[in-house]
Image (cartoon, grey):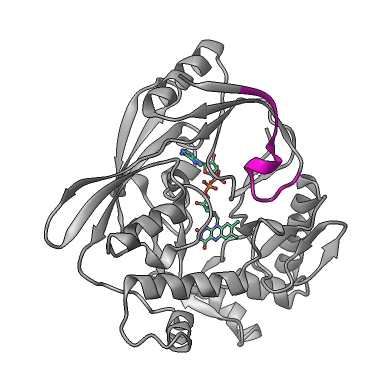
Amino acid sequence: MIEFRHDVDLRSLHTFGTPARARTVIELHSQDDAAEAADWLRARGTSSLVLGGGSNVLFRKNVDTPILLNRIKGIEVVSEDASSVEVAAGAGENWHGFVEHCIGHDWCGVENLALIPGNVGAGPMQNIGAYGVELKSVFESLDAVELATGEVHRFSRSDCRFGYRESIFKKPPHKGRYLITRVNFRLKKVPDFNTSYGAIEDQLEMMGVRELSIRAIADAVIHIRRSKLPDPREIGNAGSFFKNPVIDEDAFRRFHAEHPLAPHYPAGEGYVKLAAGWLIDQAGWKGFREGDAGVHNRQALVLVNYGKAHGNEVYSLSERIQQDVEAKFGVQLEREVNVIEA
Ligand SMILES: Cc1cc2nc3c(=O)[nH]c(=O)nc-3n(C[C@H](O)[C@H](O)[C@H](O)COP(=O)(O)OP(=O)(O)OC[C@H]3O[C@@H](n4cnc5c(N)ncnc54)[C@H](O)[C@@H]3O)c2cc1C
């Protein structure tokens, strides 16, 4: 049975903590609930907004369309052999809880993604990534209810067309069309560690780790993240507000001639990725604050709510940063955070 709540204060349901209310929140605990909610929406001819942990959204106003709050739980082994295991996780499982579950079972593959806030179901939405690993490297398939029909569809890795913080679920015509209910992962039982990010190596050394393990890598990542990123329980934020811009090699040559010290990384044949945080920092925004909206003083990529900022104030700050970075560097910043306007 689906549960309804009316006139809900959303502040505790998203990590920016900016004020917004929802007319209706429908809490889902199973795939059947998702299908029932789809029927309910269809009968009323209304659209909806799916919410997981609320760690990648910015509300600009109150939400009139019903919010589907995904709380579908459960982690189970689907199949396994000597070298790998296929694990299914309910989309409403907390992501870091899932990572800890894998570490506890010695399943390798998600340890670099430790401590990313939010739920399992949102992971494939933007192909979450951190410290040299993206979700797509362990992704097997997902199940999603098509909200317009109530039908369940299975999407393979190639169906999802994962890219850098991208999947088909972020773009029309798939955007807003599906509610992801369960995600299947393929994890390794044999060690296959990724410490390509220098910071992990340095941290492991500082921790005195002599023998690499899944636990040690996760602990190193957790330590780095805690020292770098603001905790949303203390300062409202949604992690990186912008994506790192990817530009073609011609544009990069021109950019690099003017800014030889700018960090840059290969981004596939003919493309180069720039560091959005560096651009914002160099443009002078790091630590900027106006009212309660600001740019974090240690991490320029993170916009913050110091307490009473409205979503619109954070949004206009993001617009000013975009305009300034484009004027100074000729580079367009795209928002990573999902801006909720409806
Ligand atoms: C401090 C901090 C650090 C972060 N670090 C990282 C990082 O290192 N790497 C990274 O990739 N991200 C990072 N993020 C962003 C965020 O944690 C991830 O994007 C996460 O996957 C969002 O999960 P969520 O459940 O909170 O999604 P929500 O914010 O609830 O939703 C995000 C989007 O996904 C949609 N959605 C959510 N669940 C479903 C579902 N079941 N079916 C269909 N659509 C759904 C929503 O409609 C929305 O459009 C960080 C955020 C914070 C606050």
Asked which quadrant contains residue 324, the reply is bottom right
Q: Residue furthest right?
A: 291
Q: Quick check: 124 left or right of 83?
A: right
Provide residue 319's location: percent of width, then percent of height.
75, 55
Where does the N terminus fall, quadrant-wise? top left
The percent coordinates of residue 304 (x first, y second) are: 73, 59
> Residue 65: image x %, image y %?
63, 25
Q: Nearer the viewer, residue 179 or 85?
A: 85
Residue 329 visible, this angle: no
Name of the residue lying farthest toward the left: 82
Q: Total marks drawn?
A: 0
Which range is magenta?
5-18
> Residue most toward the top?
43
Q: Is residue 193 above or below residue 304?
A: below
User: Which residue sits at x=61%, y=57%?
Assistant: 334
Expressed as whole percent of the image width and height from the top left, the position of residue 74 reads: 35, 40
Looking at the rendered image, the quarter that the C terminus falls into is top right
Which residue: 64% across, 67% down? 331
Q: Nearer the viewer, residue 155 or 187?
A: 187
Q: Is residue 10 above or below residue 206?
A: above
Query: Can the viewer see residue 141?
Result: yes
Left-right relation of 132 to 281: left
- Residue 14 falls inside the magenta stretch: yes
- Image position of 313 (left or right of 160): right
User: Is residue 184 covered in magenta?
Assistant: no
35 left or right of 306 in image: left
Q: Compared to 277, does 57 lie above or below?
A: above
193 above or below 149?
below
Between residues 164 and 204, which one lies in front from this camera angle?
204
> Residue at image x 48%, y 56%?
165
